[in-house]
């Protein structure tokens, strides 16, 4: 298979297993490129990419920008707070103005779910969804699965527990779709208030005890408590959350097996995960970041082809 | 409609030619202490591996650096046709100041070699670069590229294709001329 089946990357739910395999094998090559002395390839030198971030981001934004520059593309950055959006300009107008300047690909992060899909229907550019509300974050789902494949050599039959604030997490949804398409088994774990009601409809196990989830899984993907998305109190206190769902070294050592620890970042050290776990040899958190650049390079390269 | 492919280098002559190429290389590079061999993906690597093995035997130098180089990201026809999917690159040695022998099976328009030179320069600055090809399709160049070591020279027209078959991959060593 040499071509993606989609024109945009809006969500893992729209792409096939063949697409994911193609992205992974292309990302393997780009991982080798970013470890060379000269980390640039000229492939996208005739392409202009606009990064539209309507929400704050450090990791994703930097990662996309690095990926774009390493492919030699021209990059323009747009931050909502410093733009005419504050004067009331609509999304379509904003993007059409940018496209009038001959931009080929738009990478967008937006607080409303479905924003990327909406955009893809109304403008003439290839859209990459960098996170739309609590809906999907496809490149994160891809890089998480890629990191597991790198650490364990396979994904089929691997047991992955996603632990934390599932309700507000687009990372969780993209992870679930991606891992299921690749044949892994997925469990979500968190307090009842933070697990969406019908999540078992996605064919995942649901567990409320973190210890049981850790005993079951091969890989634990720890999610951050999304305080900026919580309108009400979902748990009595942060201390109680940490007691029941915070991962520390004693708990890790008490399991009689080794599990892989992942986190999409940013880490709240001492909340969902302690420093000694985040910095341990079981953690692939920094490899996730490195793989993020390779995966994003692969996605942009394949969409531009 | 394509007629029968013509064998322009059979198995026995293939072996003799590769042997002669290795002798030529040893003439110029002696003990290969400052030299390295790089094969271009996808079809240059079988030739490069065979030459590397033969030269190691002849010189006794077991440490001649060898690398596979994929040039897909440096091609000039990206986004102008079917999507291009890369193969792997393995360059585990430092290219800086080495005498590099770049190896490919067929030299035709020269665009692949141009891409290969750009890809290689991403790894450092070699002392010098020489080009070795098994087949030189003379008079077909699109760029001013010239080989230093040539197995055989073929004068062919653009509707013909030169294919190299290998014992390891295709069951026998030969070079074929096919009508497209």
Image: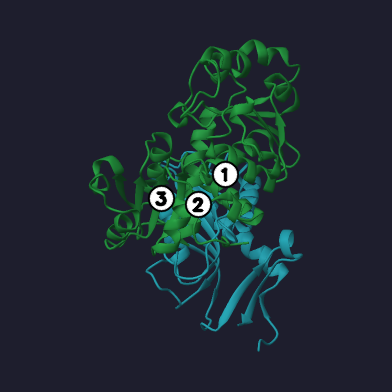
Q: Chain of mark 3?
A: A
CB contact under 8 Å: marks 1 and 2: yes
Question: What's the coloring here?
Answer: by chain
CB contact under 8 Å: marks 3 and 1: no
**Residue indicated by mark 2:** A299
Q: Which element type, helix, strand or loop, lies under badge 3? A: strand
Q: Which element type, helix, strand or loop, lies under badge 1? A: helix
**Residue indicated by mark 3:** A107
Disc with the residue nearer the chain's start (1 vs 2):
1
Looking at the image, which residue is at 52% across and 39% down? Answer: A291
Q: Chain of mark 2?
A: A
Image side of residue A114 versus residue A206, left or right: left
Q: Are labels 3 and 1 on one chain? A: yes
- Indicate the position of residue A8 as horizontal and vertical percent values: 49, 58
Viewer-nearest residue: B49 or A34: A34
Looking at the image, which residue is at 47% across and 43% down? Answer: A131
Q: Are labels 3 and 2 on one chain? A: yes
- Specify the quadrant of the image occupied by residue A163: top right
Cα separation between marks 3 and 1: 16 Å
- Indicate the position of residue B158 as horizontal and vertical percent values: 51, 82
- Indicate the position of residue A56 as horizontal and vertical percent values: 37, 36
Viewer-nearest residue: B89 or A156: A156
Which chain did the renderer colour cyan?
B
Which chain did the renderer colour green?
A
Viewer-nearest residue: A119 or B155: A119
**Residue indicated by mark 1:** A142
The image's mark for residue B1 is: none
Cα separation between marks 3 and 2: 11 Å
- Specify the quadrant of the image occupied by residue A251: top right
- Indicate the position of residue A298 as horizontal and vertical percent values: 50, 50
Is residue A215 something one can see in this rendering? yes
């Amino acid at each position: 298979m040499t071509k993606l089946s989609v024109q945009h990357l809006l969500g893992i739910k729209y792409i096939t297993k063949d697409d994911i395999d193609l992205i992974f094998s292309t990302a393997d090559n780009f991982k080798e490129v970013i470890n060379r002395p000269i980390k640039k390839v000229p492939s996208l030198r005739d392409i202009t990419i606009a990064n539209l971030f309507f929400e704050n981001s450090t990791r994703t934004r930097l990662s996309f920008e690095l990926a774009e520059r390493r492919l030699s593309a021209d990059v323009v950055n747009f931050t909502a707070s410093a733009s005419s959006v504050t004067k009331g300009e609509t999304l379509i107008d904003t993007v059409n103005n940018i496209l009038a300047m001959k931009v080929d690909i738009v990478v967008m992060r937006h607080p409303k779910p479905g924003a990327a899909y909406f955009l893809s229907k109304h403008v003439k550019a290839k859209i990459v969804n960098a996170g739309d509300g609590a809906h999907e974050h496809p490149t994160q789902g891809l890089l998480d699965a890629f990191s597991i494949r790198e650490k364990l050599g396979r994904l089929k039959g691997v047991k992955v527990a996603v632990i934390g604030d599932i309700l507000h997490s687009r990372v969780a949804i993209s992870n679930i779709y991606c891992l299921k398409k690749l044949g892994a088994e997925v469990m979500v774990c968190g307090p009842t208030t933070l697990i969406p009601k019908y999540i078992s409809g996605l064919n995942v196990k649901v567990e409320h005890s973190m210890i049981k989830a850790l005993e079951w899984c091969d890989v634990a993907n720890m999610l951050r408590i999304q305080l900026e998305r919580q309108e009400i109190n979902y748990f009595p206190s942060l201390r109680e959350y940490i007691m029941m769902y915070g991962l520390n070294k004693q708990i890790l050592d008490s399991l009689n097996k080794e599990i892989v620890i992942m986190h999409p970042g940013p880490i709240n050290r001492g909340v969902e995960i302690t420093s000694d776990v985040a910095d341990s040899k079981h953690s692939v958190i920094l490899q996730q970041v490195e793989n993020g650049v390779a995966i994003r390079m692969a996605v942009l390269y394949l969409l531009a082809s | 409609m394509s007629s029968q492919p013509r064998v322009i280098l059979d198995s026995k002559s293939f072996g003799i030619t590769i042997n002669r190429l290795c002798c030529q290389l040893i003439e110029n590079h002696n003990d290969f202490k400052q030299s390295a061999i790089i094969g271009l993906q996808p079809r240059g690597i079988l030739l490069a591996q065979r030459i590397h093995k033969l030269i190691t035997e002849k010189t006794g130098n077991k440490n001649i650096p060898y690398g596979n180089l994929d040039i897909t990201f440096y091609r000039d026809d990206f986004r102008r046709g079917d999507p291009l999917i890369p193969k792997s690159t393995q360059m585990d040695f430092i290219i800086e100041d080495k005498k590099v022998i770049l190896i490919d099976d067929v030299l035709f328009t020269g665009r692949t070699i141009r891409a290969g030179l750009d890809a290689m320069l991403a790894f450092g600055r070699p002392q010098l670069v020489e080009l070795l090809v098994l087949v030189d399709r003379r008079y077909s160049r699109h760029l001013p590229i010239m080989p230093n070591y040539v197995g055989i020279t073929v004068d062919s027209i653009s509707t013909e294709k030169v294919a190299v078959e290998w014992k390891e991959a295709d069951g026998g060593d030969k070079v074929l001329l096919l009508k497209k």
